[in-house]
Image: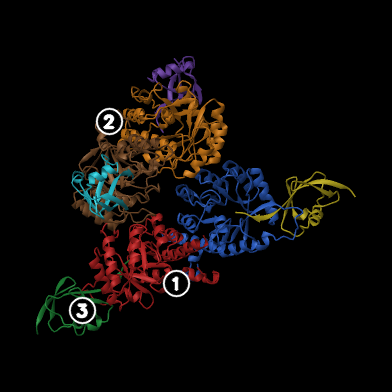
Chain colours: A blue, B red, C brown, D orange, E cyan, F green, G purple, H yellow
Amino acid sequence: MNLNDLPAGTDTDHQLTVAGKTYNSKLLVGTGKYKDFQETRDAVVASGTGIVTVTVRRVNIGQHQDEPNLLDFVPPGEFTILPNTGGCYNAADAVYTLQMAREMLGGHSLCKLEVLGDEKTLFPNMPETLKAAETLIKDGFDVMVYCSDDPIQAKMLEDMGCVAIMPLASLIGSGMGILNPWNLSLIIEQTQVPVIVDAGVGTASDAAIAMELGCDGVLMNTAIAKARDPIRMALAMRDAVRAGRNAYLAG
Amino acid sequence: MNLNDLPAGTDTDHQLTVAGKTYNSKLLVGTGKYKDFQETRDAVVASGTGIVTVTVRRVNIGQHQDEPNLLDFVPPGEFTILPNTGGCYNAADAVYTLQMAREMLGGHSLCKLEVLGDEKTLFPNMPETLKAAETLIKDGFDVMVYCSDDPIQAKMLEDMGCVAIMPLASLIGSGMGILNPWNLSLIIEQTQVPVIVDAGVGTASDAAIAMELGCDGVLMNTAIAKARDPIRMALAMRDAVRAGRNAYLAG
Amino acid sequence: MNLNDLPAGTDTDHQLTVAGKTYNSKLLVGTGKYKDFQETRDAVVASGTGIVTVTVRRVNIGQHQDEPNLLDFVPPGEFTILPNTGGCYNAADAVYTLQMAREMLGGHSLCKLEVLGDEKTLFPNMPETLKAAETLIKDGFDVMVYCSDDPIQAKMLEDMGCVAIMPLASLIGSGMGILNPWNLSLIIEQTQVPVIVDAGVGTASDAAIAMELGCDGVLMNTAIAKARDPIRMALAMRDAVRAGRNAYLAG
Amino acid sequence: MNLNDLPAGTDTDHQLTVAGKTYNSKLLVGTGKYKDFQETRDAVVASGTGIVTVTVRRVNIGQHQDEPNLLDFVPPGEFTILPNTGGCYNAADAVYTLQMAREMLGGHSLCKLEVLGDEKTLFPNMPETLKAAETLIKDGFDVMVYCSDDPIQAKMLEDMGCVAIMPLASLIGSGMGILNPWNLSLIIEQTQVPVIVDAGVGTASDAAIAMELGCDGVLMNTAIAKARDPIRMALAMRDAVRAGRNAYLAG
Amino acid sequence: MNAIQIELNGRPHPADANYTLADLVAKLGLAGKSLAISINREVIKRSDWPQRRLAAADRIEIVHAIGGG
Amino acid sequence: MNAIQIELNGRPHPADANYTLADLVAKLGLAGKSLAISINREVIKRSDWPQRRLAAADRIEIVHAIGGG
Amino acid sequence: MNAIQIELNGRPHPADANYTLADLVAKLGLAGKSLAISINREVIKRSDWPQRRLAAADRIEIVHAIGGG
Amino acid sequence: MNAIQIELNGRPHPADANYTLADLVAKLGLAGKSLAISINREVIKRSDWPQRRLAAADRIEIVHAIGGG
């Protein structure tokens, strides 16, 4: 939305504050599954996001090393880089991966913890997630945590000190939208830190619905990256998040 | 959305052409149920719409006549005024009402036909609607027609020469959203003139869903006018329609 | 359900009375799409129905004439045969077809009127349905009428004298269940004659939901005939209709 | 359903086997919230269930002791009594409660573990549930476990040795039905022991849907006990479970 | 004998001018079956079949019940 | 002067037999407003208001635009 | 005779030092009912009730089955 | 000079006993890239790369950022 259109002051209504830092968009986007890094950047820019997730993986040794680097296209100077633990199935791997990420990013402590339950569903492994969150928080990380929509375990993660609760809307990459709005509403109601819907958002209306329920943000990747026209879908998501937020505020 | 963000030429993707005239928004808004005419205007402007619906009713004779007039706040020079037949329960009344409206508006022929079935549901009376549409088209009107989501009768109305098919999403003022997306999709698929969802849109995501299904536009009134903050809700709807359209195009 | 289990007198709670005749089941079943007439009969018997629909079509002349006849398997002495107008796309054909059916069945006047809108959706053509219903009622038929879920036209059909209103749950053969429970509830609320959901019921829970909404009966064909095990599905539907009715009564 | 109606042998299709014992119904019912013990018994009998849940609580000391006892109305000789841990919010209380229950019931080891997260939602506390399940299994209990619809933690409970997985359909007493059929289907697909939907079933169609998804059973209490006519609702549920099971088998 | 042409269930069909509907039904091997017959779209009562003679170019339709929903 | 009775927007209303529609509109303080007028349900063009005289028992309807959806 | 104070289902309760659990159950009019009893959160088998004596400050809990889901 | 065998990102890799981590990174053409390195699962600060020498059988992991959600 063109901010000039907005009544004075409403701008802040579309900001997101996580771990003490404020961003001008409530939309967070991933960088996976794009055609190339240029398309990744174009979609990220079009989305208007301030927070971009990346995954940490082994370098392919020996491969000619002049290949482009993701962080050259979404530089930490321009965006807040949010390293995740995609591919980790236990607490130890997740903690180690984020320690590596912190070193790689010059010590910044914001991270997205996701410990997966199995390769088929990518549903979170909550016991390992709780264990990893505790270790990471002790180690000084600001943990944004991918979790199930279980309000009790979400509360445990908040009480532990996580800086954002990120329940799945539905299975990662499924695009099925918000399967259980009641659980999500329970989490929103009880949570003091930002609640950001993560995974399962399939199209613009799903993002709008999440915001209308009162979420503080939405994180998505596949819905944009796998669209026929990722740039346009990024614009759609940017506007859908604003529309849903305005609808929530206008009640 | 800030058009500067858009890939060249995509602007036209958010236009709506009805009866040969092109508008820069796919959103149509009503003027009923607002606190006052100033709030009506502010919401209409915020929505970015080019087409505004009004109802034609008897003047209150004797009432002091210096009262403000709706058309001073949404002047025909600035917006396309779309007179409807709210409150008509048979074809004869609807035809007469629109003939009066045409004279009042200096002969412009675009109108919204709605013949209601009963006062409780405001569901359309389709047999009377078909009869009235035929008469009005013969009489030179460009008829945008409020109808049920029955694809067969929608086709009859299109074949008859209606310039826009406007199926209800759900009962007028109910805000229940799109109850039967399958019927709506059948209508969208078969119709050559614009299909505009009319009635029942409750919040931003409902508008986005309608556009994602492939509608050419959305008409709403209560969702905006009865929101706690109508101006903000108008912004929400403006963005939701754009978001849904972009999502449909980005597929 | 074993009637012995039922509190005294509740048995009548599962009866259906149409055009003055009372049946011991609220389930009506079709005879189309079965493997053979024996399977048809077995499913019909398992369903516990008292009313069986058939279609009237031209005899294949010249074909060896000792082929089995449907009515030998579901004889009019054992079941009430409900001839329908499947395949009719206008009022004239439907009226003629039911006049032939009445003669074929020795003059019994109960019939199911369905005038279809197109071959693709099999959605009813309501204007032709209204016209045919009027003619048939004048001609002395007891008309059970397949219609859309439009409450206004449903009322017109009732006022005209139809003996049962049979709105579609969803498109014939689609098995999508009840797409618009609100419209169906409006019809149930306003109608004095039996309301029987016709078409679209896909599985047992769909039938239960229809009864829980307060329907007087359910008519189905494809869901049973196209199941892997039609006999068992017929049992499922018989019990689902009773379960839904009991749930409705137990509130 | 009258078993005489059933094709030979299908009877076993409606049995449930838990911890080596086979029951003639896939429906389990609770004993809470009834008007009195006689109504409790009448509904239990009407439901056709073989397994009845009870809660273990302190005797009111001093209260005149000739008051009726629940187990006189649903005697262990006639039904399998399934003690639950309603009201327990941590593993220690749950384990202690079931040890008391085992002693009270003369040492029978089948139990329903439910550790609640909070009094408002009665959502399960999964970490405490996992802890308690481990202890109880070591102590020789056959644990049927109430849990969230998280497939990963459901698998942990099965691997641990629970004899039945009992995910909630929706919040206890909410009657909202199955909010997330996808998660439930993942659990059904992966689980070797019986999967029994517990909590949230509101009416007959909800029970049918659970069975159509492939569940091995349904446990309910409020839907029957709080109906205007609990006996009739018990009949409805009995038939709905059979109908849903037959529909699942008939495909 | 005197041959005429009728239309039977949409197809041309030869008949004898002396035929009654009853004769036609018998010839077609349909006697005793559960049927209805129209001539030129007018329903002919079963009781009238023995009297009713065919005329050249009559459009005759013979229907029966088949499976339907 | 010669008084007649007309029906105006459903209510009896006194008028002068010499009145034109334009006179009536002026008398009602509606001159220059965005209106439409019918006499006995026939729409009268604005351009005809100055000529068109009222007759006794005329059913006159004057409408304007109000908020609607 | 020698009186002691125990805690019974969360409330202070007087008892006799010679009491066995069986005595207590009888005194409370609960004999023969379907119950379970714990002392200081340890479950006491029904068969041990006649031998098991109460001690001052024992926390005794007596439970039975009530309706639940 | 003195050759050793290390494990680099899960595969055996030859190295020189005198190598520092910085040397290894340079040899691999990764100098100046945005990376993190661990030896035997212990993260090694970038500032320590120049001092830190490799030992035989060290399990070395070098990671970077790739696309993810």
Q: Position of residue D12 (x, y in %)?
A: 43, 28
Location of mark 3 (residue):
F28
For label 2, the crowd category at 10 Å Cα-Cα, with few meaning under 14, some 14 to 19 and many 20 or more, is: few
Q: Is residue C98 visible?
A: yes
Disc 1 to disc 3, how far (Cα)? Answer: 40 Å
Residue C161 vertical placement versus D48 (above, below):
below
In the rendered image, which residue does mark 1 sit on? Answer: B24
What chain letter is assigned to the residue under label 2? C
- Residue type at mark 2 is Pro
Left-right relation of C56 to C134: right
- Nearest to the eye among marks 1 and 3: give it: 1
Mark 1 and mark 2: Cα distance apart in space: 66 Å
Residue in front for this viewpoint, B248 or D159: B248
Q: Residue furthest front?
A: E1
- Residue C171 position within the rendered picture, expressed as x and y whole percent measured from the top left: 37, 51
Are discs 1 and 3 both within one chain?
A: no
